[in-house]
Image (spheres, coloured by chain):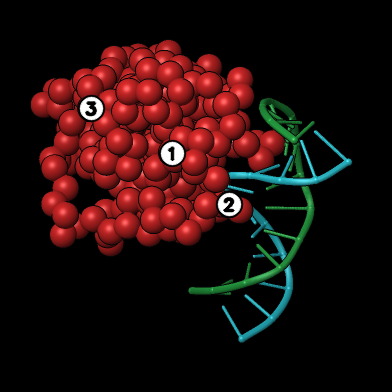
Chain colours: A red, B green, C cyan
Amino acid sequence: MAPESGCPPSSGQPLPAEFHARPTDIVARDLLGQFLWHRLGSGRVTGGRIVETEAYLGPDDPGSHARRRTPRSEIMYGPPGRAYVYFTYGMHECFNAVAHEPGAAGAVLVRALEPVCDLAGMAERRGSVVRRADGGVKEALLCSGPARLTQALAITRELNSADLTRPPLWLTGGEPVPESAVAVTRRIGLRRGIELPARYIIAGSPFLSR
DNA sequence: GTGACGATAATCT
DNA sequence: GATTATCGTCACA
């Protein structure tokens, strides 16, 4: 699909809540190749194709916010298919999709997108770091990190607990990604639980973090 | 190209 | 009072 040709594309159907009601690591794998969209107050839709995710499990995962059940992590124990947006490092927001089996807890951190719709708006929100000397845009820097993509898509904590099956913040289906294109690594940036292989990427994508 | 470091505030102990 | 699921900048190669 060429960027900006029908944004968002009408072909993709919203992912149903049942998509998220499965083991968290399975959902993290299956979110690769799907689309994340945000309809802004202006009516404009911005978003892209998911190329990198991480699974964060329940109380037994030392790297997960859900290792303790607190007011912040409570949403990870709630119904699958909602947004978990948290604030960290004093300046960054990160977006997760709550995903787990009945009775469990967990969420999938979306770490990187391939930009598809409203690249100009993304560039504006991301600021001078994505601008080239000649005025062009470094597309690989727009959404290549969990805090970068929330900034590019204007996703804030106000969207915490939003229903991801419908606008203004929602997910739609894309072309399935074959196993041969998927790689699994340890998670990034953690102090605890970093050894768990729970980061899923579309190998070789130019839009990954790091 | 790589690696070190400071910014900055919500959340939790 | 300590910690943090990050990023941009700076030094150096």
Q: Is residue A93 left or right of residue A82?
A: right
At which x and y percent is residue C9?
A: 67, 57
The residue indicated by pointer 1 is A57
Q: Position of residue A91 (x, y in %)?
A: 65, 36
Q: Residue A33 carries which label?
A: none
Q: Which of A20 and A5 is in front in this view?
A: A20
List the residue tagged with mark 2. A192
Could you say whether the residue bearing mark 1 is in a helix, strand or loop? loop
Residue at figure coordinates x 44%, y 55% from the top left: A196
Tag nearer the camera, 3 or 2: 2
Asked if residue A189 shows in the view, the reply is: yes
Q: Looking at this view, is C10 or A14 the one in front?
A: A14
- Whole-percent x and y of residue A24? 34, 37
Label 1 to label 2: alpha-carbon separation: 13 Å
Helix, strand or loop at mark 2: loop
Residue C9, above or below A56: below
Q: In the figure, A1 relative to A73: above or below?
A: below
Few, some or many residues within 10 Å of mark 3 (<14, 14–19, 20+): some
What label does residue A19 carry, if any?
Answer: 3
Q: Is residue A183 left or right of residue B2?
A: left
Q: Are marks 3 and 1 in contact (CB under 8 Å)?
A: no
Chain of the residue that carries numbered disc 2 in the rendered image: A
Amino acid type for the residue under numbered disc 2 = Arg
Give the alpha-carbon distance from disc 3 to disc 1, as whole Å: 16 Å
Q: What residue type is labelled 3?
A: Phe
